[in-house]
Image: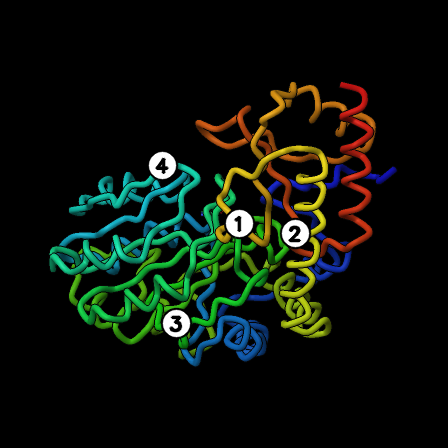
Amino acid sequence: MSDHIHLYIPGPIEVSQKTYQAMSSPMIGHRSSDFQALYGGIQPRLQELFGTTQPVFLSTSSAWGVMEGSIRNAVAKKVLCCCAGAFSDKWLDVAQRCGKQAEALQYEWGEPIRPEDLDAKLATGEFDAVTLVHNETSTGVMNDLAELAAVLRKYDDVVSIVDTVSSFSAVPTPVDELGIDVLLTGSQKALALPPGLALFTVSEKGFERAKTLPDRGYYFDFIEFQKNQEKDMTPSTPCISLIYGLRSKLEDIFAEGVEKRYQRHEKLNGLVHDWVRGHGFEFFAPEGYRSKSLTCVRNNKELDLPQLIKLLKTNHSMVIDGGYGKIKGQTFRISNMGDETEESIKVLLAALDDSLSKL
Ligand SMILES: *Cc1c(COP(=O)(O)O)cnc(C)c1O
């Protein structure tokens, strides 16, 4: 049995010993040449992973910091929030709390965002920004980013803001090819780092929009990030330990190969899917829109989920998730992101079988 609880929840996830070791590197000053070397040194690999020639910014916050910041930097007129789950629904609330005009393109939880609906909404000309969650972690729905991005590219006045928090580095999200204006992610999902760091890119259009807005604030001001980037620095003191962890993780990702990493996620996700089907469970997400980084399983057998999770934790030192928000208890979620292997997923599935037999 493991010496710690292995997290198979969709974030935070299991963090490797190598990463922890990297994070305990001695501290350096954030205005020192050592920091500039650390920051500048990881930019090329970050840009390759994001598929962009734009800088990749590092924000010392969770992803929500940048999600809120994006609203402040991008919305002048009115934002359309594509809503179909806990994270995407929340973005509408956050936009309103920032004092912005905002409207939902609302779907039932578990449904994907339809490109034709997005197109029809944007054709009204009412909106100058859109928020979209690529992989809705609460429902296990992975939207068709290529199709949705094709619609977004038709609208020159619309700044697209895309959350890839639970899909980034598990599936390709090539920023420049897709033409996404703001793409953001967080450290504690597929990047397999501890929480506390958000990563994002901004297009020229995104910067141009930001410059026109007087109430961007300071901490998440895109223009501040851009100015500091020119010196390989961040606006305020960053989580330097996590950046050491990120450097180590980039070594891992490129040693494995980015394509191989995507293939591994697909394969491990397939193992979980086989288990779901083999046990007569159903998927919460419809066919064709199922996430590759996690699986949201419908509790169609009405299992006692708290008990299942307790058995798994007590007997096997593993944790899965018992459902998020209003679908807690009706669903459970299994993550296959990060450093998981065929072996570690098979061990989990065997432990789940054992726990099911004891329910
Ligand atoms: C986890 C998650 C977030 C929130 O991330 P925080 O790090 O808690 O701010 C946002 N969006 C999605 C899709 C997520 O999975």
**If you read the primary sequence from the N terminus, does the residue marked by circle 2 or circle 3 appear first?**
3
Q: 241 and 84: which one is in front? A: 84
Q: Is residue 62 visible?
A: no
Q: Earlier in the sequence, mark 3 or mark 1?
A: 3
Q: Which mark is residue 86?
A: none
Residue under numbered circle 2: 269
Residue 239 falls in which quadrant of the image?
A: bottom right
Q: Amino acid at mark 2?
A: Asn
68 displayed left or right of 245: left
**Residue of label 3:** 178
Kindly report the distance in space between the C-alpha atoms of the residues bearing marks 3 and 1: 20 Å
Q: Give the residue pinned by disc 1.
A: 290
At mark 4, the secondary structure is loop
The mark nearer the N terminus, 2 or 1, is 2
Estimate the spatial distance between the alpha carbons at disc 3 and disc 4, rounded to whole Å. Answer: 26 Å
Give the residue pinned by disc 4. 108
- Amino acid under disc 3: Leu
- Whole-Å distance between the Cαs marked 1 and 4? 15 Å
Q: Could you say where residue 275 lies in the image, as x and y percent from the top left?
A: 72, 41
| Neighbours of disc 2 within 10 Å: few (<14), some (14-19), many (20+) | many
- Colouring used for the render: rainbow
Where is residue 38 drawn, in percent x and y? 59, 73
- Contact between marks 3 and 1 (CB within 8 A): the answer is no
Mark 3: few/some/many CA within 10 Å (<14, 14-19, 20+): some
Disc 2 from disc 3: Cα separation:
24 Å
| Amino acid found under the numbered disc labelled 4 | Glu
Helix, strand, or loop for circle 3?
A: helix
